Image: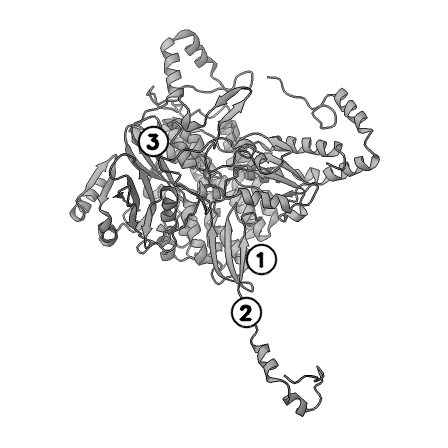
Amino acid sequence: MPVERIEGHRTGRTAEESREEFERGLLMTTLDKAVGWARKQSMWPVTFGLACCAIEMMATGAGDYDLSRWGMELFRASPRQADLMIVAGRVSQKMAPVLRTIYDQMPEPKWVISMGVCASAGGMFTNYAVVQGVDTIVPVDIYVPGCPPKPEMLMYGILRLHEKVRTEGRFK
Amino acid sequence: MTAGRARGDLGTDERVTEIDELSVASTHEIRQETMVINMGPQHPSTHGVLRLLLELDGETVLSGEPIVGYLHTGIEKNTEYRTWQQGVTYVTRADYLSPFFNEVGYCLAVEKLLGIEAPPRAQVLRVLFCEMNRIASHLVWLATSGMELGAVSVMLYGFREREQILDIFEAATGLRMNHAYVRIGGVVMDLPEGGEGRIVEFLDMMPGRIDEYERLLTKNPIWIQRNVGIGALPAADALALGVTGPTLRAAGVPLDVRRDEPYCGYETYEFDVVTRDAADCFARYEVRIEEMRQSLRIVEQCLDRLREPGPVMVEDPKVRWPAQLEVGPDGIGNSQRYIEHIMEESMEALIHHFKMVTEGVSVPPGEVYVPVESPRGELGFYVVSDGGNKPYRVRMRDPSFANLQAVSQMVEGGLVADVIAVIASLDPVLGGVDR
Amino acid sequence: MNVAELAERVRARVPDVAVARGEATVLVERDRLIETLGTLRDDEELRLDFLSSVTATDWPGREPRFRVVYELSSTEHHHRLRVKVGLPEDDPHVPSVTGLFPTANWHERETYDFYGVVFDGHPNLRRILLPDGWEGWPLRKTEELGGVDTRYHGAFIPPVDRRTT
């Protein structure tokens, strides 16, 4: 089974594609690049662990798979101090307004990772009680499938998000 | 009120007595209100999406009402639309920190309805994985409680040990959490090559680690101050409120489903039912630490019994799940032998496999209630069948659902910080509460 | 005591006892529910003093439609008994047992939430797991599962309860 190789600087693109991206990025000003680099360097997630994926998220933050390598071990409880929301777990209909409130309380710039299939698409729970994908409520940047995704999968999703943040301009 | 008087001009006694009586009286009628504060559902210290409505008088809690339902997933309704085998994958995600217990309870209930029993080796494997799951769940409890009460390093240690256990789970079942390993009629596959060796290594390492936690916490003055005497729940109240598990045993009541209504051969294992008398948060901490040691004892006894080989799934073709999985050269778990058999050798086997996978097992009509002892208490499965290939009703009596009712009583009169200690010591898992 | 003895002892108090698969089940009229549960709790041989769960099952098309199921156990003797009450469709009321067993509080709220069975005398009968303004009683067999259809690259898959395979 072919395995995707990550080439280039943690980008998931080949060397040529990275070069093209970089050249396109020459249009970005130095300020944009600096801002992009700074934003991705220590993105603080808000604690939004809901169900089983939350345990895997905590395991990713713990010692064996260390999120501290990217400055992200500090899960802020207050959304006002966070810039990343990892929606980890199934979102029930009762929780949906709370999710939106927390998202609205986060200041710009903010990103959302939808972790696990339940958050991405409702998962195995195609029923009355679960929101079929949080992208119906908040805009999602990265979807990480899995039930639950292994910590390595979540880390890969976070790194792709970092690349996305690093290469996008200041104004989203 | 006489106007024009200079404020703060308290010169002679004569002047003081002329101070307006109304203004003096109004300083005695300071309006006092109690605050109603919402804690959760998004909160770093409630174990999951629990919402607490606290009525506070300053820092003292007058009343605390837990409001649940923020993780309601409709598991029970969903099982009515899937086959009996698929029910395992739904039920295992309810109480997500103890997936093996959910699976074992459900499968025992369905096996009781079918009137079959899993082979002895499968029962030993069930006990083995359940006890390791108990240790893993208690480690998460220790990690999160420690972190919530301020002992952040315990979080890292707890998860470090848990990773060892999850590695073993992954090697045996393919998943770190929510394994659909226990199936109707047995377990889906045997231990892998070297599996016993890894468990033996784990057994050698773990008691020393538990001693480490005790050295860090048990005599720690801060831990003692935050836990001793907090959240008292005496035995009579606990029983009336339907509380089971370590919370009840910390109040001195030695109720343990493994001892009282044994399943999967628990009557043949030697272990102690751990109780304490103080019924406070510290007693619950002690009970869980000791339970981890007792679980290690049981795991050792399981390994002894696994020396002889044997089948891990019943032979009855109408019930057994059709493949013994192996990891093939392409990294995917399929049984090449079995695929050869159904595709090339036998047409009946192919038809049978097809029917088993699409239709599933047919369970005779009836109802059963099977309790198992999960790390949080009595986890009961009330399963009703109407004779078809789908469950008619699967009701999970989750221990955290009943345990959480005790929160109102335990937090009354305490401080806000004690609310956190109380909830941490109850160890609720909202997935089970809300299902 | 084993199941047969338990059934005999219970039969002396309440006639309608059935034993199957090693478990004893008692069928009670709803007017006699509180009285029966009290007797079962106070009898020295039975001592069924722990209520594990309260739930209901829905049998649309049958009379009575709802069956409320109480799982009792004894902390002393470690035996179990199931008590069932049948409720008609047009009048799903049953007295609440929170006076005898405070633990029934949330269990009865959940049964109300899922089935619409009203427990008279319950101190706080509101929805517990579903949002407050939810309409309908989702676990009734006449209610749909509520999934969404999936459309993907020209394929259409209806939700689980409407699939024919």
Q: Chain of mark 3?
A: B
Q: Secondary structure at mark 3?
A: helix
**In the rendered view, does C60 fall on the left or right side of B286?**
left
Q: Residue furthest top?
A: B344
* Depth order, front residue of B351/A67: B351
* Image position, residue B281 (x, y; %): 48, 55
Marks 2 and 3 sit apart, C-alpha to C-alpha, by: 58 Å
Residue drawn 37% across the image and 21% down it: B359
* Depth order, front residue of C148/B168: C148
* Depth order, front residue of C9/B433: B433
Q: Chain of mark 1?
A: B
Which residue is tagged 1? Answer: B222
**In the rendered view, does B235 fall on the left or right side of B22?**
left
Which residue is tagged 2? Answer: B32
Q: Is residue C4 visible?
A: no
Q: Are marks 2 and 3 on the same chain?
A: yes
